Image: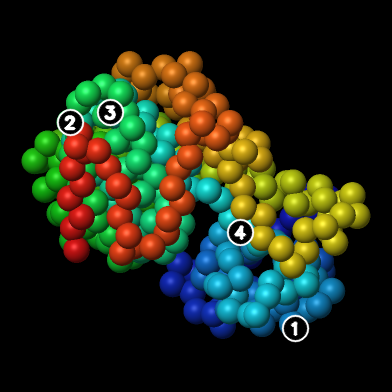
Amino acid sequence: MGDDCQYYIPSSEASDEERETKIREAVNDGADVIVCVGYLYGASLAWAADQYPDVKFIAIDVTQGDIGTDSIPANCYCITFKEEQAGYLAGYAIAKDGKTKLGFLGGMAVPAVIRYGYGFVQGADAAAQELGTNIDINYFYGGQFYGDANITSRMEGWYSNGTQAVFACGGGIYTSAVEAALKANGYVIGVDVDQNYIGVKGVADGSFAYNPFITSAMKGLSEAVNTALSDIEAGEWGDIAASNGNFGLEDGDYIGLPTAEDSWNFETFTVDEYEAVKEKIKSGEIVVDNNSDDATKPTVSEFTTVNYIQ
């Protein structure tokens, strides 16, 4: 399974109707398993699951609430992640690496982004307590999943006032953080996948003076999809259909930071230290609060100041 794969990509500002059109095209081309990525597919999946009962839908970062039905459709499997764990690892690592003025730039205040951000705060605070060092975190949602001049200007203000690294979490919004960072010798933490390649490419083509990506808070998108496809191939679709698989470190390496030498750009924080804290989360010794309510902020120690910006 997976040998015959085709991409159907709607525009960045697609409507539900356009997403439904792409699903229809895939079905008409013979697809019997369709992977849809992002909570914006929720309404389209409600339609598609009813319209095409013989097609299996794997929905990434989509919940029953996004679909809007009383239960997850019988031909749909939702996959979500414990982003708070990835955020925690990134926050812990960057603070242990000696960065004391941090930023979180979220896209929209949707549950996955909130979990990333609150995990980041918790991890940075844990490191600050271990080090006995005060840290300061600027925290802001841009209200969109792309960068623009206004967000870049805000990021320039952060960096010029001493922010050393910003966790840019929300699609293409990272472009504003990168643009601002490069003007101030600052750094960026990527999200979802290892975004180090963006920095490497920028240096190679001369558009970046240096690679601003220190690390990325990743979730195992490919791993989770491949697991689901393997279940289908093994005739075990019935075990996962109409359910929500929520993946974290307890389930395997579905969460983490990239440890390849080219992607590990910390100055002092080591892979061994990273593996140690990762194992504590996996074992349950460290429990990261998974709150995704924007109104309920994470509790932090006296070492950490979080500046929530409206």
Residue that carries the numbered disc 3 in the rendered image: 129
**Viewer-nearest of discs 1 and 3:** 3
Q: Is residue 57 above or below residue 283?
A: below
The answer to which quarter of the image holds residue 79 is bottom right
Q: CA distance from mark 4 to mark 1?
A: 20 Å
Residue that carries the numbered disc 4 in the rendered image: 60
Q: Position of residue 23 (x, y in %)?
A: 67, 73
- Crowd rating for badge 2 (residues with CA inside 10 Å; few <14, some 14–19, many 20+): some
Q: Is residue 67 above or below residue 133?
A: below
Residue that carries the numbered disc 1 in the rendered image: 51
Q: CA distance from mark 1 to mark 3?
A: 53 Å
> Where residue 134 is drawn, which disc sits there?
2
- Crowd rating for badge 4 (residues with CA inside 10 Å; few <14, some 14–19, many 20+): many
Callout 1 amino acid: Gln
Q: Position of residue 106 (x, y in %)?
A: 33, 55
Callout 4 amino acid: Ile
Residue at x 89%, y 49% (from the top left corner)? 234
Callout 3 amino acid: Gln
**Viewer-nearest of discs 4 and 3:** 3
